[in-house]
Image: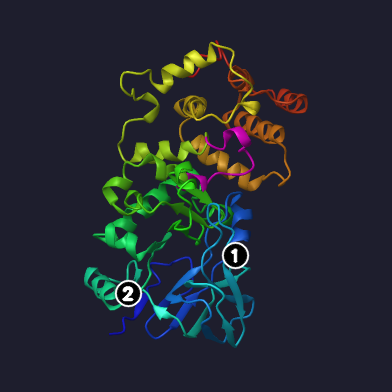
Amino acid sequence: MPIRIAIAAALLSSCAAAADFDNEAGVYTISALPSAQSEAERMDRMALSDQQPAGRFVRNGETLIIGVEDLPDGTSLSAVVGFLPMWGSRLDQQVQPIDGETRFRANQDGPLFFRLIAEDGADAEAIIRVQGGEPLPLYIDGAMDAQDWADELSAHDGAPFVQLFGEMAMITLPASVYARDPIDDPAETFATIDRVLQLQDELAGFDSQTERDRPTPLRVHYLVDFRVSAKDRENFYMYATEQFIGMLDDNTADLTDPMRLREQWGIWHETGHTHQQNSWTFESLTEVNVNLFSLYVQEAFGRPNALGVSEDGEPTHFERAQSYLDNDPPSLLDAPDDDEFFFIRLVMFHQLKETYGWDLYKDLHKHFRANPLDADASDQDKADALIEAMCELTGHDLRPFFERWVLVASDDADARIEAQGYAVLDGDPSTIFE
């Protein structure tokens, strides 16, 4: 029997009044979103997903007829078939602009998505009608209970994919993966995912105090990379890229099982990459400062600090950091991409947090949203901007501290910092923040 799925205004408060998904009949009232690119530029970070699921599967060669009623001024609508390029695969989505009633032929298999974009950020919605494709199980958080979801799964048990759609995240799983690792309580799963994302938004300074610092209405799209080769799957646990996070088919429960998600550093880490700002992430920090988001979530969930945990009697990362500093470490700008040292270098950021609190990093993210660097900024430009921002936000001349970690400002940045007359740190910069 048809299942009509509505999302109330309270659920999607940042969008238009309501959205309605009837994947059986192929009739949808969709709320507009800002584009992924415009939001990435506003937030100075990786693009999130600006797509919304139709809960239908389309086969290669199938003809679709998609119509839109009264497309609001200032909006654009596209139908999207399939997935963005995955690890080692160049196969991209098929994108078809929709204006009035549009007929087109699918050139690949895949789920159908919509992109209803309002570039000016205004509230808008459109009614969309789809002929073609077949329904697949679609869960809408906040609008379906456990029985609704069981009915949806039963009604479309032959579909190749399962999709789940929440306020802050979207999940797409092959049906075979879902059958092996079903989601016992999707509402609890989304509550936990949303909590992780809310915590990471907090650390990123999205407190809505200004328009610039409002949280994004876009979602993190978690999906299984079912195209990855047997060889390539040995290279990652998960990966974050533009508009989605790719998972392996055997680790989806780390996301969907609330108990596991509350203790899985790896998925906090990959989700953290979607929050990582471009302006102060030079290359050798890519796998370092992202872990601030993991530390923040870990602390909120009451887990022991990973930097202070000894594995099998080995020195902790705090202990290893002291040895690292005592043995002429390389310049942080030129540091090798070696995971042996990622946590050691994270200690540098943790020392600042211990002295100034998490608010320092919340303010740092706000600072760079207000003062983003150009896309072609060099690693030295980013290092200078980080050091200068930290001095400004703390009121201290932190150059000796960063120099102890072999992060050295350029002569120009040195002169700018010197001119500000910040308070000078007392004591040995290698121990000042212990």
The residue singled out by tag 1 in the image is: 35
The local crowd at label 1, few if under 14, some if 14 to 19, many if 20 or more residues have their Cα within 10 Å, is many
Q: Let me know if residue 321 appears in the view.
A: yes
Q: Which residues are magenta?
A: 271-287
| Lateral position of residue 321 relative to residue 212, left or right | left
Q: Residue furthest left?
A: 147
Q: Where residue 420 sits: x, y (%)? A: 70, 26
Mark in front: 2 vs 1: 2
* Amino acid type, callout 1: Ser
Quarter of the image where the N terminus is located: bottom left
Q: Mark 2 or mark 1: name the one nearer the start of the chain.
A: 1
Q: Where residue 240 sits: x, y (%)? A: 51, 49
In this orientation, which residue lies closer to the viewer: 299 or 49? 49
In reply to whether residue 282 is colored magenta, the answer given is yes
Q: Where residue 100 sits: x, y (%)? A: 60, 88
Q: Residue furthest front?
A: 230
**What residue is rendered at 48% in x and 42% in y?**
235
* SS state under label 2: loop
Quarter of the image where the C terminus is located: top left
Q: Is residue 21 above or below residue 184?
A: below
Q: Where residue 166 sits: x, y (%)? A: 39, 63
**What residue is rendered at 55% in x and 44% in y?**
276
Q: Let me know if residue 18 appears in the view.
A: no
Contact, mark 2 vs mark 1 (Cβ under 8 Å): no
**What residue is rendered at 58% in x and 49% in y?**
45
Query: Label 2 to label 1, Cα distance in Å?
Result: 33 Å
